Amino acid sequence: MASVVVIGTQWGDEGKGKIVDLLAEHADVVIRFQGGNNAGHTMVIRGEKFINHLVPSGILQNKICVLGNGMVVDPAVLLKEIDFLASKGIATGPDRIRISEIAQLIMPYHQRIDLAREEKKGAQQIGTTGRGIGPAYEDKVARRGIRFVELLEPETFERMVRMILEEKNFYLQNYFNAQPLDAESVIRQYREFAERLAPYVTNVSLVVDTAVKRRQRLLFEGSQGTHLDIDHGTYPYVTSSNTLAANACCGTGLGPKKITDIIGIVKAYTTRVGKGPFPTELTDAIGTHLQEKGAEFGSTTGRRRRCGWLDAVILRNAVRLNGVTGLAITKLDVLDGLESLKICTGYDYRGQILDVVPASLKVMEECRPVYETLPGWAENISGINRFSRLPKSVKSYLRRIEELTGVPIDIVSVGPDRDQTIVIKNPYVRKTAARKPAARKK
Ligand code: GDP
Ligand code: IMO
Ligand code: MG
């Protein structure tokens, strides 16, 4: 029985949705364990595109999809997503989708505070998705959050909303000069959500435990990326949850020893949405080329993603922090036609070469990437479905990533569609002969 965790190794949007959808074919249960609708996970099946923000990316494979307790859930967005999927003929009933009774709710004041705070910060803003994620996690930690279990107890819910709104409205009006919220209309709106979502709400740790006991195959879907992690990311330019593989346990109630594989998704170059340090960012024609060819617009907010070369310092950080056992390289086709490619192997900080990400933002901002150059390829690789058929320079680029990270590449993605994927080693198929990982080299 395999329990596989899929996480992003960079700053999000690595293609987690595509890889989770692909692996979900072999899984029984697919579980999201953190984040909320700041995530935008894209799946393309025979040309048809789906972007999920809350429902796990196993839904198109007709698997049981679970929203874990580590998530913050906006019920309005969830219902919209369920309705959209159902309109496409996809099964979205309570036998397919399960929601943790102890997952936190995103409330209208969370989103209002998120937006007001970003506006007030002006140039100092983080560039959040404006979905209320940070304020919802703040309330969780401050022990004034509302969970699904309270949503389903009308009296408790009403009492909590009235009490919390007193404080939130004071903050909104007096600090941000923003509009207050009316308790009665919030209660009315959420009563409707409660009625519709009640059949989906359950004890997720039991769902997970039952699956483990039945020796079913679990697939945990991370959101955001390693460097957006609240502890280990480029703080404060991060999201408000732990995005690392370890949170697959806390965010669902799974015991750590049950995880068997950790797949790190690596975009063949680097992107970032929102503010924050990005040493390999390209503001030249190549950056624009990657942005355009890679269609690098945020799946959630539509913002233009910043683009740059692959950064092995970031990747090594991710491998260490997550205990990555295999890599999935995505968007390799976007590099088609570039004469040469660069990989950052270290950071030059005032003449000293750093090979780990510095904690200080000030140091990070002064870091200059140290590059090595590899040959590019002229071929269009988006139709190639066998590793052996990839051009020589593609193989050397991949080999170099294995060397720099010390982790084998298990999956190579050469286009957005589910079918445009080369699977070298499937974590659910134990018999597949693994290629020998390259020894880690600097
Ligand atoms: P996620 O948040 O990690 O799931 O990634 P997003 O869905 O936000 O962004 C990844 C984008 O790249 C989506 O538009 C995908 O359809 C697309 N994509 C994924 N893999 C590939 C690939 O191998 N090649 C190309 N060209 N696009 C890809
Ligand atoms: P997926 O799962 C890329 C970024 C935002 C912002 C910072 C904080 O699709 O990879 P938040 O709204 O979470 O408080 O914003 O984090 N961010 C993402 N960037 N992909 C995501 O999710 C992201 N979720 C949040 O742009 O910089
Ligand atoms: Mg995304």
Image: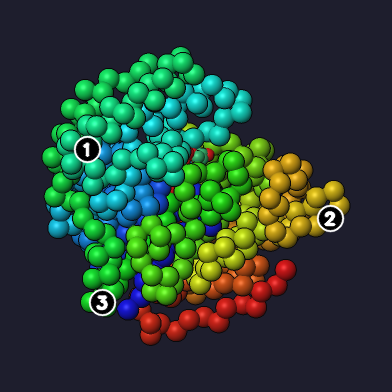
Q: Residues within 10 Å of mark 2 (few under 14, many from 20)?
A: few
Q: Name the residue under label 2.
A: 352
Question: Which amino acid, by three-letter code, is at mark 2?
Answer: Gln
Q: What element carries label 2?
A: strand
Q: Please name the residue shown 44% across and 44% down the image.
A: 141
Q: Residues within 10 Å of mark 3 (few under 14, many from 20)?
A: few
Do the residues bearing badges 2 and 1 touch, measured as CB atoms within 8 Å?
no
Badge 2 or badge 1: first in the primary sequence: 1
Do the residues bearing badges 2 and 3 touch, measured as CB atoms within 8 Å?
no
Q: Residue 213 carries which label?
A: 3
Q: Please name the residue shown 25% across and 71% down the image.
A: 211
Question: Looking at the image, can residue 284 be seen?
Answer: yes
Image-based side of 249 in relation to 95, left or right: right
Q: Residues within 10 Å of mark 1 (few under 14, many from 20)?
A: few
The vertical placement of 403 against 419, above or below, is below
Badge 2 or badge 3: first in the primary sequence: 3
Q: Which is more toward the observer, 109 or 419?
A: 109
Q: What element carries label 3?
A: helix
Q: Name the residue under label 1.
A: 156
Question: Which amino acid, by three-letter code, is at mark 3?
Answer: Lys
Instruction: Estimate the spatial distance between the alpha carbons at disc 1 and disc 3, rounded to whole Å.
Output: 35 Å
The quarter in which the C terminus is drawn is bottom right
The quarter in which the N terminus is drawn is bottom left
The vertical placement of 434 against 138, above or below, is below
Q: Which is more toward the observer, 129 or 23?
A: 129
Question: Looking at the image, can residue 269 be seen?
Answer: no
